[in-house]
Image (cartoon, grey):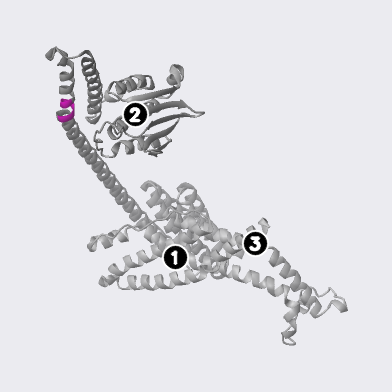
Amino acid sequence: MQSRQHYAATLRRDFAYLLPGPVFALASFTSLITLFSLSIGTFIIWVGAALLPITLRLATWFANRSRDRVRAWGLEVPELEAPPREPGFGGLLRELRRPGAWRDLVFELLVTMPLRFTTGLLAFCWPLVAVGGLTYWVWSWSLPEGGGSLAELFGLVFPDAQLAAWFDGNLFDIVVNLVLGIVFLVTLPAVLRGLAWLDAHVTKFVLGRVDWSWLLGGIAAVTLLAVTWPVLAAIYGVHAALAGALALATAGAVVLAVRLPVTATVVAATGLFATALASAPAPGLPWPVPATGIVAGALVIAIVGLRHRWYLAVLTWAVLGGASLAGALIGTGGGTGGALANFTTFASIGAGVAVLAAVARTLRSSRGEIEQVRALTAQEQRKRAELEERNRIAQELHDVVAHSLSVTSVQATTAKYRLPDLAPEVVDEFDTIADSSRRALGEMRGLLRLLRGDGDAELAPQPTLAELPQLIAASRASGAEVEFVDGLGDAAAREIPATVALAAYRIVQEGISNALRHAHGARIRVEVRRASDALEVEVANGPADETRPVQPSPGAGLGLAGLRGRTEALGGTFAAGPEPENGFAVRARLPID
């Protein structure tokens, strides 16, 4: 049952992806080709300068719909949103410089029509052939007489074969159509899945983060292959098989030039040399380099010059020119004849393309370096502004908070000397206050060094789990009733990583502080325990003591948010919320491994 449901769901998904493809392709192609033609035709009067960015934005919209269809089918493809357009003429020019927009335009204009119409029409026709073949015996009587039959076609193809008298005629047609219907029906899921896979992966490849050179080089190579093959075979009289091999070599060199310039140069030179020999002599025609060869050679030189060092472009030009000249000399038996003009044309075009490509690459490299310098400058300015802000905050903390803590520490320390009649328990209270203020002052100074960017601040000792008893004792000294359940012990506490131990200490510290501020007089329970692969921390308190009416201290709400961020940064989980009977609990689980 589940397999049938999966089978039906897969068919529905593939059909839903393939059948609307031609409609979307037709809509995008017709609208974009119209706008693009108007843009190019009116660019000279500046109307196209405003219309072309609109065309690119529309191409990106159509491309994003194609991405949505691929994701709905089940294949991940990145969404490339168009950035907000900047106002003015400069914003229009920046839109024209956005590579992703041109890639989307090329895909919607050149790829979607042949791809979607092929896959969509096959997906539409395949089940029709299956249904037609399986039901042929039902509707075959409606076919007109004398229209020919499969039996007659079989007799023409195999004239020596004889069909039995009872098997001849309509019965033969019914059996053949039934077999075809069964074959098409059985292969329907695999065919639909293959068509959808091809369509989706081509879309992902082109609309993903593929280099534009691969895309344009592939389109140019396919176009060259389609044109060069019939030109060599029909016009230059080269054998069809050899013409196909030569066309494939010159077209393939265009794609190879993107990553393998030396290999592309060798392949292109071999193709041009062999073309000159195979087509010699060619009176009245461009020779030794046909027009398609000039285009292929110029594209190879251009791609090498744009993608690689300038001397590689010059080397490619020299090798291709030498190969064509050698082909001309050998093809004419040592004389050049009319081939010299053709060779001069190819060499001139190749030299111009090499120079332009080298200049364009230099300009692009310089612009990239300028952008990099600007990015580094902006980053340094942000760092400088951040450091100035941190220094300002550190100064404020030093002048206000640290000063107040210092005064509190001094007053609590000297109270027993300034007030000699104090009771012993009051003296102990002042000593506790002095100790807490000194500890807070020490941590404040460490924070100030960290804010000021002091390199030694990170080396300052941080609290560990071994100091939790001191924290609990200081909290008890303030009058709080704190129960501490130590589920670790000294040996286990030393095995906890320093970052996890520090986070646990801060969670306990903030949990107790939160309970003292908001639930005065409440009983606090602190538990630290080791799970299998994590350290669990819990700080819970009961309701506030109503017999001791102390107004809760308001907070900024940053303490718990900071603990959550600290916990999640270590890959742990954090929870804080009310407990039954008006209590509150803070719980954290910190992974150790």
Look at the image and give the residue range highlighted in magenta.
Answer: 400-404
Q: Quadrant of residue 146?
A: bottom right
* As drawn, 580 above or below 52: above
Q: Amino acid at mark 1?
A: Glu
| Disc 1 packing (10 Å; few <14; some 14–19; many ≥20) | many
Circles 3 and 1 in contact, beta carbons < 8 Å: no
Asked whether 369 or 489 is in front, the reply is 489
Q: Which of the numbered marks, if any, corresponds to residue 189?
A: 3
On the picture, is 566 further left or further right than 26? left
Q: Looking at the image, tell me whether mark 2 or mark 3 is earlier in sequence order.
A: 3
Element type at mark 1: helix
Magenta-colored stretch includes residue 52? no
| Dot 3 or dot 1, earlier in sequence | 1
User: Residue farthest to the front?
Assistant: 547
Residue 108's tag is 1
Residue 506, disc:
2
Q: Nearer the viewer, mark 3 or mark 1?
A: 3
User: Spatial distance from mark 2 to mark 3, Cα to Cα?
Assistant: 59 Å
